Image (spheres, grey):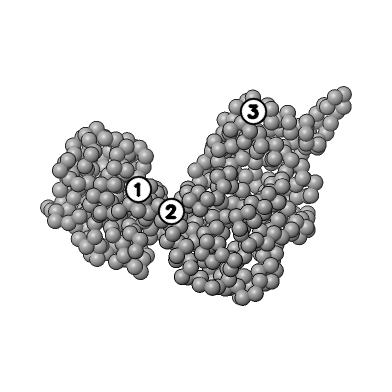
Amino acid sequence: MQEKILILDFGSQYTQLIARRVRELNIYCEIHPYNHLPDDMDTFKATILSGSPHSVRDTDAPQIDLSNIRGETPLLGVCYGAQYLAQTNGGEVLPSKIREYGRANLAKIDNSSDLMKGIEVGSQVWMSHGDTIATLPKEFNIIASTADVDVAAYKIEEEDTYAIQFHPEVYHSTDGKQLLENFLVNIVGCSQDWTPDSFVDTKVDELKTQLGDDKVILGLSGGVDSTVAAILLHKAVGKNLTCIFVDNGLLRKDEFESVLDQYKHMGLNIIGINAKQRFYDALEGESDPETKRKAIGRVFIEVFDDEANKIKGVKWLAQGTIYPDVIESVSATGGPSATIKSHHNVGGLPDFMKLKVVEPLNTLFKDEVRRVGKSLGIDAELLGRHPFPGPGLAIRILGDVTVERVRLLQEVDAIFVKGLKDDGLYDKVWQAGAIFLPVNTVGVMGDERTYENAVALRAVESTDGMTADWVHLPYEFLAKISNKIINQVKGVNRVVYDISSKPPATIEWE
Ligand code: XMP
């Protein structure tokens, strides 16, 4: 059985980072909210308590009964977790005289402690707390201190319970990974065998058992998640998987044909649907961004439902949902997906949504999906593709969407993206695209005055799309691309580059 570690989330902004660091050690872990413990609690080898925006001194501070965990399996408290363990066992937590945020250095270390092995005095740690542990209960022993914080780390006697005031998951804690490895490998005894290859083997076996001879349908988008999900499922159920790829007429230039071709080469049983006109009809005269999104969503469901109904005996709908979406919907604080789900009206669901749902990637972060994709032999170019929004070019055409505007924007976008690839810039950018501006500007071409469209180019750096900064693309590159666009795309006489960060701007213009 897969070894796994439990991370109990008390709402810290860093909880997902803890999970990522644990997984970087090839150890599988799951995040669960502190107030919603998993049913299979006894299958976890150890528990980590996360930090929290709350103070343990608040009357409404998160509380948890740890009696079934402490002393039974190893336990590591981080920040709030450390303070909670101290306070609930008779220690004292007080507001810090100096609020400790940012870098600090360990000034004293008990090197005989298994948790601190290989970590030396001076090691930089990341602090982020407004409270401090003033006194520890009797059987709690300090194993590390900084100049300002006496209790930077402690161990409880006679049990494998440790706690640290700083955040080992943040890169600024230079020995954070070592500390987590000390805990998980030396203390807990994890075998570090969770790799993309082992994930594929285990998941394919699981899917075979779960799905048997049942038929499955999946909507492919050309993106990384749905592609990896499709290949995994294909390995498990072969031709019983039918993929549906819808051309909504809002994809990049030639994307539908080239992606469809790639999928067929991967051996997938795939139906490509040209539904362009249905989308254009639904978008006609719509200029409000949210109305456009809703129209596209509605038509997609109609098209998908029509196709799904043609396949007889389907039992499962597969989705490329990944772990951050799952965590969000069950987070301690309640994420946005809680609201999305409340909009579902079961009585009015299209037929395919009444199918059982299988989500083979719902335990993986995005970069892990890419690694699994690589292990499955999926083309590096496909795995490295920039994210592309579901509503496609419709939200990059400001105002009304028309066939002509789509064509024009596809040309502009294709020149920009090809330019990025040719100049080795594509992989340095997280997402790039072009935006059609519904304004005409004056220009001169030859001896003639022109009055044509302006387009904007956008390229951003980001890790998750939540925040982003514009990429400082070389001026020479921008000059070359601008020239190409104006010379080659009829109807464009001006190119601008978007230099806004998110926040306060967003990545997309609509
Ligand atoms: P914003 O514009 O909100 O975009 O900064 C953040 C990320 O989300 C993508 N995006 C969407 N993706 N449907 C999608 O599937 C949408 O309606 C949508 N709107 C924005 C955007 O491309 C960026 O990666």
Which residue is located at x 43 percent, y 57 percent?
Answer: 199
Instruction: Indicate left or right for 294 with 108 as reference.
Output: right
Would you name the residue on which mark 1 appears? 25
Give the mark toward the camera: 1 or 3.
1
Instruction: Indicate left or right for 126 with 247 as reference.
Output: left
- Circles 2, 3 touching at the beta carbon (< 8 Å): no
Image spot of residue 162 (x, y percent):
22, 51
Would you name the residue on which mark 2 appears? 197
Any part of residue 131 in sight = no
Give the mark toward the camera: 2 or 1.
2
Q: Is residue 382 above or below residue 332?
A: above
Image spot of residue 198 (x, y percent):
41, 56
Label 1 secondary element: loop
| Quadrant position of the N terminus in the picture | bottom left
Q: Earlier in the sequence, mark 1 or mark 3?
A: 1
Would you name the residue on which mark 3 appears? 477
Residue type at numbered disc 3? Phe
Q: Residues under labels 1 and 3: Cα distance?
A: 39 Å
Mark 2 C-beta to ligand 1 under 8 Å = no
Mark 3 C-beta to ligand 1 under 8 Å = no
Q: Residues under labels 2 and 3: Cα distance?
A: 40 Å
Label 3 secondary element: helix
Q: Quadrant of residue 472?
A: top right
Q: Residues under labels 2 and 1: Cα distance?
A: 15 Å
Which residue is located at x 21 percent, y 34 percent?
Answer: 121
Give the mark toward the camera: 2 or 3.
2
